[in-house]
Structure formats: structure tokens, C-alpha cells
Image: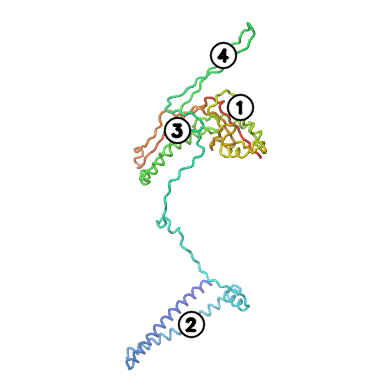
Amino acid sequence: MAKEKKINSRALLDEAQSNRERCGQISERLTALADVVKNEKRELNKDETDEQKALSRELNSLLLREQAIQAEMVAIRQLDKEDVPASQNPTIRLRELMDSNQKTTIVLQREVTPATTAALANTGVIPIAQQEIMKPLRSGLIWDKVGINVHTGLVGSLRWPSHSKAVAQWADEAEVLVDKSIDYSKLEMSGTRLGIAIPVTREQLYNSEGIVEQVINEEMPQAISDAINKAVFALEVTGKAPKGPFVDLVAAADAAPIDMSTPSKAFKALAKIKANLLATGITPKALCWVMSFAQKADFETTPRDAGSGIMLCESDHILGLPVFCTQEMGEGYVGLGDFSYLAAGFFGNLQFIVDPYTLARKNSVDFVLNNNFGMVALRPEAFKLTKITPAV
């Protein structure tokens, strides 16, 4: 009912406005006819008389319709007052407030939806300032910093013959010596294929004006380095990756963790790990600690003992040995090792091929990088792994 009233009221208002405009036009014409008669000092001729009578009839009709419209508008307003409670009728409510001398604020509002910048998206109206391309983040890429001797151009397999120690015997005069033996063994290493292939369309290459090709040339070797870094410091073998020096030490580390609740005891435990490694007889050349950034931060903020102000890790060193961080080392684990005893190298030649033919039907180019990498711990005793139990 309310919707019908709104439509009828609008229609009546529009009709009243149209009628008033027509009445104005008729009045102007009647005035013009009167001016002609006055100025020419004559009576209206037949055509003018007929026009005057027709305009007068139309004017009377419009005035009667105006009265009818006003009556209908009054009726509609009365219905509105009957349908809407007095407390919700703005006219009645305003009158009540004015009668009671209360302060009243009238705010006229209309719904406005302003145009936003979304309407200009991808139109070129808003300028775009192209910046330097952002390279991916790489944290803790340290396999080339911890002292690994990496060889290139290796072929076939590498073999290291080894033998056990000969043990001498103390004996009395004329005592028969017990027979001793020397056990022989070997250690072998061969390369495992490591590669990456990135196919791209020619449209992507020439539309980027060489940027895509430059990114590919930079990223493919970095991807190889990432994979090697992960394999060296991983605590478990992933896929066909070679086994790193800490993989076989996880079980022993889990069985005897270092408790950080008492930092002084933890510091002694770290010193004992270092001593046990050196006690194996290896000649230290590149001995260092390896851990996550979070673990190093914990060591850097944990004092060795109460009141000393000296932290477990000072100036990137623990017990005189440098500390390297990589996220590939599992959280809560600390590795100690002399990586000069980790044999590592690339077998064959690094092959980087840009193949424009294989994917020719797709108008694409295949960028392929292949090589073979291998590693093996020549002295497993040169590596130690411990687990850290954080303080409660």
C-alpha cells in the first residue's frame, strides 16, 4: 500500500507541474492577443476569437484539474497519517517537538556512492612506476662457506681404500706375540643427477624484453645451490638426494638431549661434544657449529652463568668455533663438524641447454640445466649432532 501511495503522489505532482506550465503558456498567449487588440485599436477577428475561446476553455479545465489534484494529495497525506504511528510520522513528531519547545536538529541526507579508483583500474589513467624486479629470498645458503672441498670435472666413481689401525702388544721376554690383523675396506662415491627444466613460450621471452630469460639464467644455478645446501644439512634423506653427514646421527641426538634449563651445564655439555669429536684423532681444519637462526638467537641471549653477562654465543662463536646458520638444519638441533672431511663434487660437465626445437609446435623454448653431484663423509667421526631441549 505504501508503495502505491508513493507512486500516485509522484504522478500527481508531475501532472500538477505539467498543468502549471501549460497554464503559464496559455496566460502568455491570452496576454499577447489582448496586447494586439489594444495596440491596433480593433476588435478580435474570427480566428483570434476562436483561439481565445479555446484557450479559455483549456485554462478552465486545467484549473479544475489542479483543484482535483490538490484534493487527492490531501487524501493521500491523510492515509499516511492513519497508516504510520504518530511516534514514527516525521511531521507529527516534529510538531510535537516544536510544541514542547525541545531543541530539534533536521539533517537532510541522500545516498551517495562516490566513484573510487577501482573504476580506473587498468585504464592507464593511474600511472604505474615500474621498479627493479624483486628476487626470491635465500637465507642460510652456507654449504660453500663451511669448508667443504668441492671438486669439479669428476668422472665415474671415486673410491677411498681404508684400513684399520695396527695394535701393538706388550709382552714378557720370550713370550709369544698374539697374531694381529689389519682390516681393509673402501669408501665409494658417485654422482647423483641434479637438474632443472623451465619451458617458456617465445611470447613470454620477447614481450618481457629479455627480463624472463635473465631471471631464468640467474635462478637455475641458484636452484642447484639450494638443493645442495638442503642435502648437506638435512637430517633425513629426501627423494634421491645424497645422504648428508648428520642423517645417521639423529637417533643418538634424540636419545641424549642437552637441557637448557641450566645454562652452565648446557655450556659444559657443548664443550664435551667438542672434546669428544677432537678425541677421535681427526686433525681439525674447518671445525664449526651449524644451527638454525632461532637456535643461535637463543644462545646469544642465554648467559653462561648468572651474573656473568657472557652469553653462550659471543661474536658468532661458541667455544672458539665459528657458528653458521641455515634453516635446513632442523629446529632444536645443533651440528658440529669439520666439513673438510666431507668429500663433495660435481661429476662430468655442467650442461646448460637452451632448446628452441623440441617445443617448436608450441612456439616455446626449453631451458634445461643438468649436472651430477655427490658427497660422502670420509670420516663420520668428524661430525656430531645434539638436540637442544629449551628451558621451561
**Mark 2 vs 3: CB contact within 8 A:** no
Mark 2, mark 4: which one is toward the viewer?
4
The amino acid marked with disc number 4 is: Ser
Q: Which mark is residue 181?
A: 4
Please provide percent x and percent y for residue 37: 34, 91
Within-10-Å neighbours for mark 4: few <14, some 14–19, many 20+: few
**Mark 2 vs 4: CB contact within 8 A:** no
**In 3D space, how far apart are the residues under numbered discs 4 and 1 (Cα atoms)?**
30 Å
Q: Which mark is residue 68?
A: 2
**Mark 4 vs 1: CB contact within 8 A:** no
Placement of 75 over or under 355, stated as above or below: below
Q: Which mark is residue 194?
A: 3
Mark 1, mark 3: which one is toward the viewer?
1
Please report whichever mark, 2 or 3, sits nearer to the chain's N-terminal start.
2
**Mark 4 vs 3: CB contact within 8 A:** no
Please report whichever mark, 4 or 3, sits nearer to the chain's N-terminal start.
4
161 or 70, nearer to the observer: 161
Please provide percent x and percent y for residue 318: 59, 33
Residue at far top of view: 174
Please report whichever mark, 4 or 1, sits nearer to the chain's N-terminal start.
4
**In 3D space, how far apart are the residues under numbered discs 4 and 3 (Cα atoms)?**
42 Å
**In 3D space, how far apart are the residues under numbered discs 1 and 2 (Cα atoms)?**
112 Å
75 or 377, nearer to the observer: 377
The amino acid marked with disc number 3 is: Leu
Q: Which mark is residue 275?
A: 1
Within-10-Å neighbours for mark 1: few <14, some 14–19, many 20+: few
Within-10-Å neighbours for mark 3: few <14, some 14–19, many 20+: some
Q: Residue at x 39, y 56 (%)?
A: 124
**In 3D space, how far apart are the residues under numbered discs 2 and 3 (Cα atoms)?**
94 Å
Q: Is residue 34 left or right of residue 142?
A: left
